[in-house]
Amino acid sequence: MKRKKLEEQFFKIIMAISTYLIILTLLFLIFVILKRGLSALNWAMISQVPKGGFYFGKEGGILNAIIGSFYLAVGSTSLAFLIGLPVALFMNVYLIKKQGWLNHIRFFMDVLWGIPSIVYGAFGFTMMLYLGMRASLLAGIITVTLLIVPIMIRSMDEVLQTIPSGLMEASFSLGSTRSEISFKIFFKQALPGIVTAILLSFGRGIGDAASVLFTTGYTDYIPTALNQATATLPLAIFFQLSSPIPEVQNRAYASAVVLTVIILVLSLLARYISNKYKEHTIR
C-alpha cells in the first residue's frame, strides 16, 4: 500500500511539473512577443499595405497579410467543414456497429493528422506543377484544406462519440431515418464540440506557414481573385524575421502579436458559443 502511495505521489509531481512547465513556456513566449512587438505595433501597420522600402524599415503595414490570412483560413476551414462533417456523421451513425472499419478510419485520420505540414506543402506544390497552376490563394486553400481535414474529422468524431447511444435508439423507435438522426439530432447535440473543432482547424489554418510556403506565393497587394498570389501572417513573420534590419525584425514580432490576438479572440468567441449551446444538449 505504501509503495502505491509513493508511485501515485511521484506521478502526481511529474504531471504537476509538466503542466507548470507548459504554462511557463507559453507565458514566456507571450512575454517575448509582447515585449518586442508592442513597440513596433501601430495603427498604420495594421491598416496599410507595404509601401516602398517597407522591408528596409520604411513606412507601410501588413494589411495584405492580415486579409490574406483570413481569406485562406476561412476558405480552407469552410471547405474542410463541408467535407469533414458528413464523414464524421457517417462514421458515428452509419458505421457505428462496424468497429473494425471505424478503427481503421480513425487510425488513418490520426496518421494524416501527424504528418508534418511541410509534407502537405510539398504535395500541394507537386500537384500545382502537375496541373499547371501558379502559386495562388486557391492553391493555398486546397493545400491547407488537406492539412486540416483530418483535424476536423477526428475532433468532430470525438465529440459525436460522447452522444448517448440511447438517443439513436429512441430516434429509430420514432421512425427517424439515419439522415434525419445525423443532421437533426446528432449535429445539434454535438454543436458545441463542432464549434470547437472548427476553431481548432481555423487556428491551424491561419497559423501554419510550411504548407503555404510554396503554394500561396507572396505579394504586397490584397488579392481580388482566387488565382492571385496571397500574403499570410505566418509568411510575413518568417520573411521579416529573416531580415538583418532591427526595425523589420520588430515588425515581425508585431505581426506575431496581431496573429496571437486574432487566435485569442476566436478562442473566446468559440468558448462563448460553446457554453451558450451546451445547455440545450442532452446528457
Image (cartoon, rainbow, N blue to C red):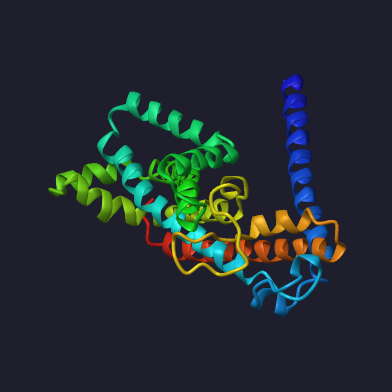
Q: Could you say where residue 225 lies in the image, as x and y percent from the top left?
A: 44, 65
The image quarter in which residue 117 lies: top right
Residue closest to the eye, 90 or 282: 90
x 55%, y 60%: residue: 230
The image quarter in which residue 1 lies: top right
Judged from this view, the residue extending furthest toward the front is: 132
x 71%, y 79%: residue: 44
User: Does residue 118 appear left or right of residue 11 in this picture?
Assistant: left
- Asked if one can make out residue 8 in the rendered structure from this viewpoint, the answer is yes
x 16%, y 47%: residue: 177
Image height of 47 relative to 231, above or below: below
User: Does residue 13 appear left or right of residue 165 in this picture?
Assistant: right
For the image shown, how many numbered marks are present on the structure? 0
Judged from this view, the residue extending furthest toward the left is: 175
The image quarter in which residue 263 lies: bottom right
User: Does residue 221 appear left or right of residue 99 in this picture?
Assistant: right
Residue closest to the eye, 123 or 105: 123
x 54%, y 49%: residue: 215
Image height of 5 relative to 268, above or below: above
Q: Could you say where residue 137 lies in the image, as x and y percent from the top left?
A: 49, 58
Q: Could you say where residue 169 lies in the image, as x and y percent from the top left?
A: 22, 42
- Asked if one can make out residue 190 in the rendered structure from this viewpoint, the answer is no
Q: Could you say where residue 281 lies in the image, as x and y percent from the top left?
A: 37, 57
Residue closest to the eye, 48 or 173: 48
Image height of 57 relative to 191, above or below: below
Residue closest to the eye, 2 or 78: 78
